[in-house]
Image (cartoon, rainbow, N blue to C red):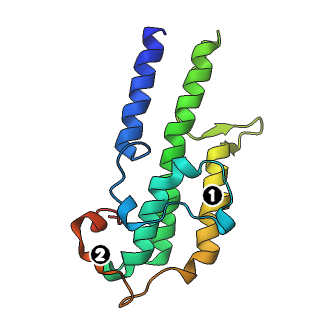
Amino acid sequence: MTAKLLVFTLTVALAALASGVWGSDPCQQYANGCSTPFHMPVFYKTLFTPSCNKHDVCYRCGAKYGISKSTCDSTFLHNMDAACAVHDAGRRDLSSSSSSSSSSSSSSSFSSSSNGRKKRSACTVIAKDVFYEGVHLLGGLFYRGVGETESFCSEHAARGCLPH
């Protein structure tokens, strides 16, 4: 393994830990992860689990702190996009280090297409079109209103799962 690849791998691993992609998830104790209808398998479900856990807590506790369903949903998409950026950067840098090309790669989860428009990565497509649209359209059934929130919502750890 080259020194450059080793440095890159360690950088991605540290960024993933800092973003909650890997490692301990304090929100997990209050959530059920990325639930899907009929427990269907979906790409990136494991990658998005910390984002799903925060979203679950937001739906169950957000109203207590004046956080709307819309804010929970937009924060959910933002968290998944951040996870995709780390994931996609790792994939791009690994593929570019194995090729003989000396071109630099972008750190975004988007790439430019031939017509200048941004092309989304598979990860960001699944985040937006499957997970976000699913909760945006159907999540209203699960968002708890004021007075319906869970007793654990006052716990410091649960409050740390909410958008700031």
Q: Residues within 10 Å of mark 1 (few under 14, many from 20)?
A: some
Query: Mark 2 highlights which residue?
Result: 152
Q: Nearer the viewer, residue 111 or 32?
A: 32
Q: Nearer the viewer, residue 68 or 131?
A: 131
Name the quadrant of the C terminus.
bottom left
Residue at disc 2, secondary structure: helix
Give the image quarter of residue 160: bottom left
Q: Position of residue 102 (x, y in %)?
A: 60, 12
Numbered disc in front, either 1 or 2: 2
Q: Position of residue 20 (x, y in %)?
A: 39, 47
Q: Which mark is residue 1?
A: none
Q: Nearer the viewer, residue 147 or 85?
A: 147
Q: Position of residue 18 (x, y in %)?
A: 35, 42
Q: Is residue 67 visible?
A: no
Question: On the rendered structure, is 12 left or right of 123?
Answer: left
Which residue reaches farthest front?
38
Residue found at x 42% / y 62%: 54
Amino acid type, residue under disc 2 in the picture = Phe
Query: Mark 1 highlights which residue?
Result: 128
Residue found at x 53% / y 32%: 89
Amino acid type, residue under disc 1 in the picture = Lys
Which residue reaches farthest left?
156
Q: Is residue 126 visible?
A: yes
Residue found at x 63% / y 64%: 36
Q: Is residue 159 above or below residue 8?
A: below
Give the image quarter of residue 145: bottom left
Residue found at x 71% / y 44%: 117
Of the two numbered discs 1 and 2 on the same chain, state the one appearing first in sequence. Answer: 1
Q: Is residue 34 above or below residue 97?
A: below
Q: Position of residue 64 (x, y in %)?
A: 32, 82
Residue at disc 1, secondary structure: helix
Q: Is residue 162 above or below residue 110?
A: below
